[in-house]
Image (spheres, rainbow, N blue to C red):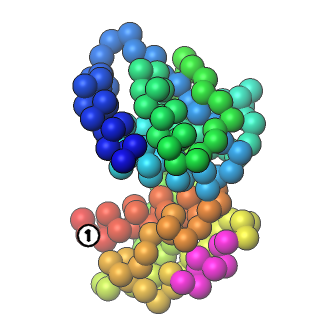
Amino acid sequence: MLKGIFLKIRRHFHPDPGSAGAGMGVTLFEQTGDVIRAEQLLKEAGIPVAVKAPPSHMRKGCDLAIEYRLEQEPFLRGIFDANALHPLGFFPVTEDLPGPSSLFLYKDFGDYLMVRAANMKITIEKASGRIVNVSGGGCPDVPYLAHILTTQTLGEAEPPRKKGQSLCAYALHLAFEEAKRLWNG
C-alpha cells in the first residue's frame, strides 16, 4: 500500500535527471546487504539511483553508498521507513564518486571468457553461456555463490545479488551481468 502511495507522489515530483543546479547526495548503510536491498527497492519504485563508493571521509559502515538526486531524499526516506531499512545518514556530495567497479576487465581464453569486476571473476564457456568458474574475493558467501553458479548457464542462473549479501557478492553480480550482456550481445 505505501509503495503505491510513494509511486503516485513521485510521479508528480520527478525532476529531470539532467536539470541544471540539482545536487547529489549519498545515503550510507552499515551492511552491504542493506545497500543491495535499498537499490532494488528504489529501482522498483522508479527512482534513479546508483551504487557508488562513498568519499573516504564519509565511510561509516560498508564501502558502498546509494547516490541520488537531493530532490529525491523524501522519497528515499519514505521507502526506507516503509521497508524497515535504517541508513546511517543522508549527505550532500559535490564530487563525482567512483562506482564499486567502474571498469570491467576481460580475458579471452578462446572457448572461454572471463569477466572481472573489482575482485570477483566469472568465467563462461562462450558457446553455451555455461558458468565454468567463479573466483576472487574473501567474503564468506563466495564459496556458496561459486557452488550454486558453476555448471549453470547465464540464462538459467539466478543473479548473485539474490543469494549473496556481501561486497564480493555485489561485485560478482556486476561481473555476472556484464558476462550476460556480452554473451547475449
The magenta region covers 141-148
Give the left or right position of residue 61, taking residue 144 as reference: right
Give the residue at mark 1.
184
Q: Secondary structure at mark 1?
A: helix
The residue lying toward the viewer, choosing from 64 and 88, is 88
Residue 107 coordinates in the image, percent (x, y): 47, 67
Q: Main secondary structure of the magenta part?
A: helix
Residue 179: percent from left, percent from top: 39, 67
Residue in the image at 56% along x and 58% along y: 170
Residue positioned most to the front: 1
At horizontal 36% and vertical 36% (from top left) the residue drawn is 6
Seen as rendered, the residue at the extreme bottom is 151
Residue sitting nearer the eye, 1 or 87: 1
User: Label 1: how many residues lie within 10 Å, few (<14), some (14-19) or many (20+)?
Assistant: few
Does the rendering let one see residue 53? no
Where does residue 109 sit, x and y in percent of width and height? 45, 77
Q: Residue furthest top?
A: 21
Vertical comparison of 76 with 145: above or below: above
Q: Residue at x 65, y 72 (%)?
A: 142
